[in-house]
Image (spheres, rainbow, N blue to C red):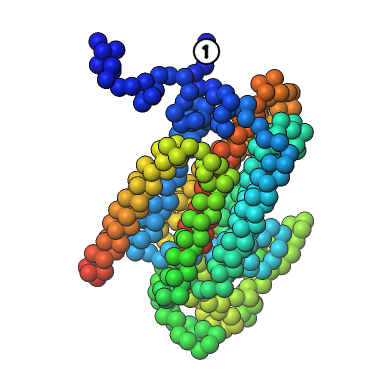
Amino acid sequence: MERDDLIVNDNYALNAHHDEAHGKIIRKKIYFVTFLLSIITIFEVGMGIMFKRNETFTWTSIKWMFVALTLVKAGYIVMSFMHLGDERKNLRNAILAPYIIFIIYLTYIALTEGFANMAIDELLH
Amino acid sequence: MADESNNNNSNDVLWGGGQSPFGVTYGKMMMWFFLVSDALTFSGLLVAYGFSRASSTDPWPIAEQVFRALPGLDGEYPLIYVALMTFILIISSVTMVLAVEAGHRNDRKSVLKWMALTIVGGAFFVGSQAWEWSHFIHGGGGGFQLAHDISVEGPEGETFNLKAGDMVFMDHHFGHLMEEHLEGNLQVVLSDDHGHVTLTDYSDHGHSVALHGLKLNKYVAGETLIEGAEMLKLWEARSVNYSFGANLEESEYAEQQSFGNFFFFITGFHGFHVFSGVIINLIIFIQVYKGVMEKRKHYEMVEKVGLYWHFVDLVWVFVFTFFYLI
């Protein structure tokens, strides 16, 4: 059977290979991302050990910083390691857009309902 | 007729088959679609964790105080072990992306080298998770509920008014022998001699452990070690309700079971992904070794399994933040 998904003579083609020189550039980028991910992880662990978990503004800010740093890490993994950043724009959007929209909605609704439950409980006591 | 209805459109806006508009092969696209659906599953689990935690009226354990042991070492190392696991997984993700890069150069030897390292890293991670599970199940020494209300003085002179049913925690040396004693091991004997509470194990590897301190609020905010006479007051007030480690019905970490259940399900489901990732990597490694990719003239299969492997790393980055850090 003739396959219609095979691409030839294109950047995306299966037979598109890069040479040693280009490989060096790619590897340099990989090592840079590795360095970045490690530094972020070490920083997060350090902050986690240094600061006590409580209801203060400091810890709440650190929590939000953890979320932001996690999204940075996730961005580098998806865009660089999974090279979604090098794929065509339509594929990138088809993968990211539905996921992100749905997750923002789900997070919003779950946390709103979760804390709403707690507020009612506090009212009753 | 379908043909006639399409006549108004010129050929350059219609996709007439042939080349994929996404610029990827069918296999890679389906791997991406699978990963999106899998990502939704994990997001659902983590959001459910957040929901349970936000709506829980019982105190929620602080992960930093639950996971602070290292294999073979005494003392407390909060988050160090899980940071190590995270690091192993990130590095194995790096070796995987290096394998993919080598594949693009048709460098079979490098692909084999980097894939082998990836498999080793993955195996280490699964092993570490097994240890973490084992430690979580066995617990950090367990604790007992108080039989009646009691007031004790803390090390800084503060007063703790404890109620019947509140948990008091033992250290792991004493706790693990206590568990054996309670399970009816006749070689482990408990003696209480003028305030010196000691457990002695008379088996082949016999040893003796004294009760040096009891902890309040071990897994939540305000952890306090009580020693000396105040500790003995707590010890005397113990009930027959003990809790050691965690299982699917109860855990020493919290009154509610959600924390333990989410730990088992989220890290278990992720660990299953890592395990299958190692197996799939191994299969592709054998294929590369046998020269299948040379015959195909491309290493796209390495790229596809690489996508899966990076996804496993990606999920762990989120689990690490939302389960362990926050």
Q: Where is residue A39 in the image (x, y as percent from the top left)?
A: 62, 61
Determine which quarter of the picture holds residue B80. Answer: bottom right
Whether B249 is drawn above or below B150: the answer is above
Q: Where is residue B282 in the image (x, y as percent from the top left)?
A: 67, 32
**Which residue is drawn at the image coordinates 61% and 58% (left, top)?**
A36
Determine which quarter of the picture holds residue B74. Answer: bottom right
Residue B203 shows in this picture: yes
Determine which quarter of the picture holds residue B258. Answer: bottom left
Q: Which residue lies furthest to the left in this view?
A: A124
Q: Position of residue B168 (x, y in %)?
A: 50, 70
Residue B118 shows in this picture: no
Q: Residue furthest bottom?
A: B157
**Which residue is drawn at the image coordinates 59% and 60% (left, top)?**
A41
Q: Where is residue B211 in the image (x, y as percent from the top left)?
A: 63, 73
Front-most of B85 and A73?
Answer: A73
Q: Identity of the amino acid at label 1?
A: Glu
Report helix, strand or loop for mark 1. loop
Whether A124 is drawn above or below B47: the answer is below
For label 1, the residue is A2
Left or right of A84? Residue A24 is right
